[in-house]
């Protein structure tokens, strides 16, 4: 059955720019970007350009070459009574309540759109929900938020006070006025406070002529009023520091802010340990399988730092005082034999090219961090195999130290857009429709989403997209074909052929607290899929997110093209699949 999911499950449409280094199938060295082919900055290596998040790429580029069109219908433009423009459709409730701005044709999407949404229900009061998103109503992206106090039946928009932050540690001035923000996530603590994570940065010289290119990650708190208002100013998690040698009041047009593009702090995600039971104060580490957490209400932020040396490491920081202050950062993506290709960078930690981290916490207080990694052995060779891998690290001491990463699964990313869609969206992946048309050109990527079973802390479940899967492989005409020499993106035989290539949502399960997974040694072609309807065997499903109910039932939401002619037109619907079984593989799924 078709579903237009709005708030039932945590839904994060995580889009990304993906550009890999190298030509043909060879990706053994990090090369310098070719004249900043995406129009962002020439400091990025090809591998860093591939991994940069879609929001940052879109905001920092000279022009947005993937502006979505918007329907300017009466329901989204004219207010209704004393409301704004709710535009509800039967039981499908619109979250953002704004009316549509009328935008010039060459800037469609700017001034109008919301995307990359994230949503969380208060675990102690299910009537209270907060939803965040990249909000383009002001033209540039900003961190948008809406809240509901009646279980999602009605919504209101909140205004996030992010016009400026304290500038002492960014530009040596009292204030730092960032020009864009986004890549949001939200969560609740056990006391009923809501939190919003927000990336902020200056757009840089390519777009504005402003030489300053500072960036930072920040957290806002809504104190006991359900998301209706937020603290000001935002509290910093990490910020790019002032230029070395600059003194307050100096620095010319840029002040003392960073003028190099790198380092850039990107794609942060947040999780709060909102477990109801706190361990005794004497317990300093989490006990796997335990019934309490030593770190109740600790806020965890993970992110990718694109550094001047060509690396993209995953970092983590935490707050133990309700988001007022954050710890020094800790490295998550440590060295591992799973990462044999360090791209010639010679870093001590070999897992040095990563993106799309997600922290999540078990009922025992164990912190898990999931991330996509691009240092796997296949990136060294010259075969047609273009897989990458999803890794997971965990912390028992509240985010101070992390285990060596373990493999959750291999996966195959979405195909190069320019190759299959008549040159559109150069340097990015997308979900091409089948047949001769070239209309589905929005940037997209595959990534992992993880959760711990609240009734069984030893069971960790991860879902992720893969273009090669049980329904899409050599036997039905879909075959990996290496990488595009022009963009570094993945190539496949059968992308535009009906019944051949199609993306599935796969499932990998750990039953030993994240030490091993069913996907560790099983090829994606043989892993269970959460998309089991007959119509899904030959159509695309992507951009999934998962959540458990308190009783241990698991659900995943995703974009779905099994309906009507979606696979041929490039239109998209939403579906929800659920797994009520507690089997070790979580292989029993049904759609509804």
Image: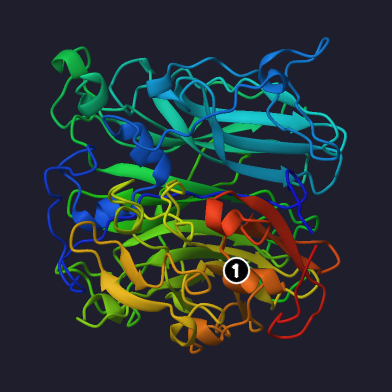
Left or right relative to 196: residue 477: left
Left or right relative to 87: residue 98: left
Q: Position of residue 225 (x, y in %)?
A: 77, 27
Identify the residue under disc 1. 463
- In what element is the residue under mark 1? strand
Left or right relative to 334: residue 553: right
**Residue 580 location, quadrant:** bottom right
Q: Position of residue 200 (x, y in %)?
A: 42, 31
Residue 175 lies, with reference to residue 330, above or below; the image says: above
Crowding near the residue tagged with mark 1, few <14, some 14–19, many ≥20 C-alpha atoms within 10 Å: many
Q: Position of residue 274 (x, y in %)?
A: 72, 52
| Quadrant where the image shows the N terminus | bottom right
Residue at 75 percent of width and 56 percent of height:
275
Q: Is any atom of residue 300 visible in this view? A: no
Residue at 46 percent of width and 72 percent of height:
391
**Residue 232 location, quadrant:** top right
Q: How is the image coloured?
A: rainbow
| Quadrant where the image shows the C terminus | bottom right
Q: Is any atom of residue 545 visible in this view? A: yes
Left or right relative to 453: residue 451: left
Residue at 80 percent of width and 49 percent of height:
123
Q: How many marks on residues?
A: 1
């Amino acid at each position: 059955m078709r579903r237009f999911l709005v708030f039932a499950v945590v839904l994060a449409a995580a889009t990304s720019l993906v550009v890999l280094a190298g030509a043909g199938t060879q990706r053994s060295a990090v090369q310098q970007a070719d004249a900043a082919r995406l129009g962002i900055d020439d400091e990025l290596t090809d591998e860093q350009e591939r991994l940069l998040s879609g929001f940052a790429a879109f905001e920092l580029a000279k022009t947005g070459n993937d502006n979505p069109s918007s329907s300017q219908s009466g329901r989204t433009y004219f207010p209704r009574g004393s409301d704004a423009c709710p535009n509800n459709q039967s039981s499908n409730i619109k979250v953002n309540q704004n009316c549509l701005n009328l935008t010039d044709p060459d800037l469609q999407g700017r001034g109008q759109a919301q995307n990359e949404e994230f949503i969380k229900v208060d675990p102690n009061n299910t009537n209270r929900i907060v939803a965040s998103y990249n909000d383009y109503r002001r033209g540039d992206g900003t961190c948008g938020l809406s809240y509901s106090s009646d279980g999602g039946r009605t919504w209101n928009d909140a205004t996030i006070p992010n016009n400026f932050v304290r500038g002492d540690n960014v530009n040596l001035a009292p204030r730092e006025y960032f020009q864009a923000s986004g890549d949001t996530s939200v969560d609740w603590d056990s006391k009923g406070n809501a939190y919003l994570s927000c990336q902020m940065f200056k757009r840089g010289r390519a777009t504005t002529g402003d030489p300053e290119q500072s960036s930072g990650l920040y957290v806002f708190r809504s104190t006991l009023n359900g998301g209706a208002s937020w603290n000001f100013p935002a509290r910093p998690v990490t910020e790019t520091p002032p230029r070395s040698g600059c003194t307050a009041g100096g620095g010319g047009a840029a002040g003392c802010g960073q003028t190099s593009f790198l380092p850039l702090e990107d794609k942060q995600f947040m999780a709060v340990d909102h477990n109801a039971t706190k361990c005794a104060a004497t317990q300093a580490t989490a006990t796997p399988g335990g019934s309490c957490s030593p770190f109740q209400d600790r806020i965890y932020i993970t992110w990718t730092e694109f550094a001047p040396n060509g690396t993209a490491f995953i970092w983590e920081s935490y707050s133990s005082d309700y988001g007022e202050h954050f710890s020094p950062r800790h490295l998550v993506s440590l060295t591992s034999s799973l990462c044999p290709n360090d791209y010639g960078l010679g870093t001590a930690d070999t897992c040095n090219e990563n993106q799309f981290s997600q922290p999540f916490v078990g009922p025992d207080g164990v912190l898990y961090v999931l991330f996509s990694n691009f240092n796997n052995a296949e990136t060294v060779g010259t075969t047609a195999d273009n897989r990458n891998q999803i890794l997971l690290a965990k912390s028992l001491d509240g985010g101070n130290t992390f285990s060596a990463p373990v493999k959750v699964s291999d996966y195959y990313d979405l195909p190069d857009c320019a190759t299959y869609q008549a040159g559109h969206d150069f340097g990015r992946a997308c979900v091409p429709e089948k047949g001769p048309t070239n209309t589905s050109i929005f940037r997209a990527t595959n990534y992992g989403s993880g959760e711990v079973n609240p009734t069984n802390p030893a069971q960790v479940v991860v879902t992720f997209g893969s273009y090669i899967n049980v329904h899409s492989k050599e036997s039905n005409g879909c075959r990996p074909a290496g990488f595009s020499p022009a963009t570094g993106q993945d190539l496949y035989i059968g992308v535009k052929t009906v019944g051949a290539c199609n993306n599935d949502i796969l499932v990998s399960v750990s039953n030993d607290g994240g030490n091993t997974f069913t996907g560790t040694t099983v090829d994606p072609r043989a892993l269970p899929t959460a998309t089991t309807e007959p119509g899904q065997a030959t159509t695309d499903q992507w951009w999934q997110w998962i959540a458990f109910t308190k009783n241990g039932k698991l659900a995943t939401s995703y974009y779905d093209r099994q309906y009507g002619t979606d696979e041929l037109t490039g239109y998209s619907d939403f579906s929800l699949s659920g797994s009520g079984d507690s089997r070790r593989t979580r292989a029993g799924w049904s759609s509804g």
